[in-house]
Image: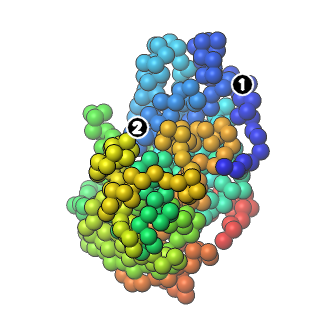
Amino acid sequence: MTKSGPVTRRQAIGAAVTAFPMIVPARVLGQSAPSNLLQIAQIGCGRIARASEFPGILRHADVARFTAVCDIDSVRLNDGKEFVEQAYARRFGANNYAKVKTFKSYKELLEDKSIDAVCISTPDHWHALPAIEAAFAGKDIYLQKPTSLTIKEGRQLADVIKQTGRILQIGSQQRAALNFRLACELVRNGRIGKLKEIYIGLPEDPAGPEEPQMPVPPNLDYDMWLGSTPVVYYTENRVHPQSPDPRKRYDRPGWLRCEQFGAGMITGWGAHHIDTAHVAMGLEKSGPVEVIADARFPSKGLWDVHGPYHVRAKYPNGVTMFISEKYENGLRFVGEEGWIWVTRGRFDPQAVAKGQRSAALDASDLRIINTPLKETDIRLQAAPRNDHHLDWLMAVKNRTQPVAPAEDGHRSCTACLVSHAAMRLGRSLKWDPQSEQFVNDAEANKLLSRPQRDPYGTDKLLQARGARSSR
């Protein structure tokens, strides 16, 4: 791994954390003393934060500590603070942890010089902008996938990360999972012969009924939540649950099924599986050259992301990738000499080595996966302990690139959004991965970006800063 950016105050962080003194004495903590810990803030305290980022960082209290949380829903903000503080109370004792700061505005949070890095777990339409602002504020970033709402936003983000030298990890945790990494290594080392086809199975979202206009809850800054997207009336199933029952408050939110805020499962799960396909092909910084797709979209109702769909994408190496809800959730790599299947689930490498089949990693011939790699074989970057959040934390401390950097995340998201454009237009599209434009297709190129509502949006921010894109 190569160095990325100059040594920063994180190598001499002691003075910066005095605003968040820990009660546990340094002589007891040793390497976990406050002066050796990264100070992390969480932006967005909803379902994904509670399932991924909160536990992902909390389990590494010897490396980093949450010192602040931020959300524009005050109920979620208070829940997030309580979640973190209760976790530290259980670990260190009721009075042996620093209280967590709360921010309604992520802009105010980014002004806090004591914060080293941020986790961003917001809705898809709120990914690129806070990540860009965090980079300009000198913070490192863990950003939930998909990287952006549009291809233009993704390019803007990747360029800013490169320009600022910040460390950004995309939440593509399959890159850290042993079975996915091994599957990619086996494909790249020719275990199934020349790769010919990839079959990706993703879920689909249901349509829904029309939803009535409702009063905006007093705990939610709805205009801010809409961000750069158009103003539309508030209804709970457009945003996230407001249940008084904490067990239901963090159910799957309705915005995931609204095209105003995302693209549906093609970016939801697609950002994971297409990313894995890119790694297996060694095309992490490229993309398809032609995509043809069809899909059914709801004709009425609030939820309007795609339903059943089929995508066929051709890549510059001659591989064809097929994506559909009709395939089992996961990836099947088909080569001239066999196939490899990989999906999420429990994976026991020792059992596989002994000849036992695994639902999480399988092959046409078990020898494909249980024959050890040779010293001279291609090896992919591994996350420490196969832990995606720990990989990011160590990359921040050591100023090295994580396993899922910004450019790779942008390229994976781009392939998803190119597929979505083909689904919307219902015809074949030629794509140039180098220029990041559709070839001789003005109608398709209009889909590279969306209008951004003032005062929000990446365009206005970058124009004000005089930033330029590499594209």
Q: Percent x, y for residue 285? A: 58, 65
Name the residue type under label 1.
Gly
Where is residue 301, by image quadrant?
bottom left
Taking the spot 66% from the left edge, 49% from the top edge, the residue there is 1
- The answer to whether 394 is drawn above or below residue 86 in the figure is below
Disc 1 to disc 2: CB gap under 8 Å: no
Q: Quadrant of the C terminus?
A: bottom right
**Foreground of the two, 36 or 128:** 36
Taking the spot 50% from the left edge, 34% from the top edge, the residue there is 57
The label number, if any, that marks residue 407 in the structure image: none
Q: Dot 2 lies on which element?
A: helix
Taking the spot 42% from the left edge, 18% from the top edge, the residue there is 90
Q: Dot 1 lies on which element?
A: helix
**Pointer 1 residue:** 14
The label number, if any, that marks residue 50 in the structure image: 2
Q: Percent x, y for residue 350? A: 37, 42
**The residue positioned farthest toward the left in the image shown:** 209
Where is residue 277, by image quadrant?
bottom left
Taking the spot 62% from the left edge, 75% from the top edge, the residue there is 434
Q: Earlier in the sequence, mark 1 or mark 2?
A: 1
Q: Percent x, y for residue 293? A: 36, 78
Residue 449 seen? no
Q: Percent x, y for residue 446? A: 52, 77
Neighbor class of circle 1 (other Cα within 10 Å; few <14, some 14-19, many 20+) is some
Please tell me how many numbered marks the rendered image carries: 2
- The answer to whether 49 is drawn above or below residue 444 in the figure is above
**The residue positioned farthest toward the bottom in the image shown:** 440
